[in-house]
Amino acid sequence: MNNAIDNLLLTTGSTFEGYKVVKYLDIISSEIIFKNSFMKSISAGIEDIFNALSFREKEMSGAMALIERAKKYVMQKFRAQAVEIGANAVLGIDFETSFGSEIVKISV
């Protein structure tokens, strides 16, 4: 199964050049919802303060690192789900990130 997950073709587009869609299997999605806890916020915030003071890229890197880890996690779940239904490719992938007062939701 790991080999199939690693070889899964992914695109945000509606086609793969050089390939033909033979069968549409299903619509799939994967999500992660996590609490934006106080400690994570403080940890990310402290790093962000130091970055702001140095004017390095002016990006909230602590928060961005947390979101990037969550995206990788949800993408692993998504790829496994696609392989479980027998897919060798997924067309039309889209990421969405939503922030609430205490939660963060990432969908693929």
Image (spheres, rainbow, N blue to C red):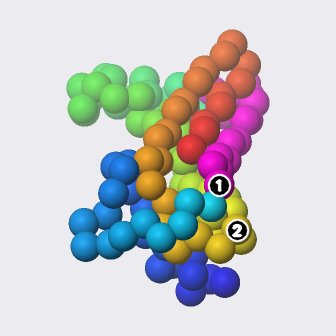
* Residue 34 sits above or below residue 49 on the image: below
Q: Position of residue 102 (x, y in %)?
A: 73, 19
Q: In the image, 70: left or right of 49?
A: right
Q: Position of residue 22 (x, y in %)?
A: 47, 70
Q: Are marks 1 and 2 in contact (CB under 8 Å)?
A: yes
Instruction: Using the rendered view, name the quadrant where residue 50 is placed.
Output: top left
> Which comes sooner in the sequence, label 1 or label 2?
1
Q: Quadrant of the N terminus?
A: bottom right
| Dot label at residue 26 | 1
Q: Residues within 10 Å of mark 2 (few under 14, many from 20)?
A: few
Q: Residues within 10 Å of mark 1 (few under 14, many from 20)?
A: few
Residue at x-position 43% and y-position 66% = 21
Check disc 2 and give the amino acid type.
Answer: Ile
The residue indicated by pointer 2 is 85
Residue furthest to the top: 101
Instruction: Using the rendered view, name the quadrant where residue 57 is placed.
Output: top left
* Residue 104 sits above or below residue 93 on the image: above
Q: Position of residue 25 (x, y in %)?
A: 62, 61
Q: CA distance from mark 1 to mark 2?
A: 8 Å
Badge 1 element:
loop
Residue 39 visible in rendering: no
Residue 38 visible in rendering: yes
Check disc 1 and give the amino acid type.
Answer: Asp
What segment carries the magenta color? 26-42
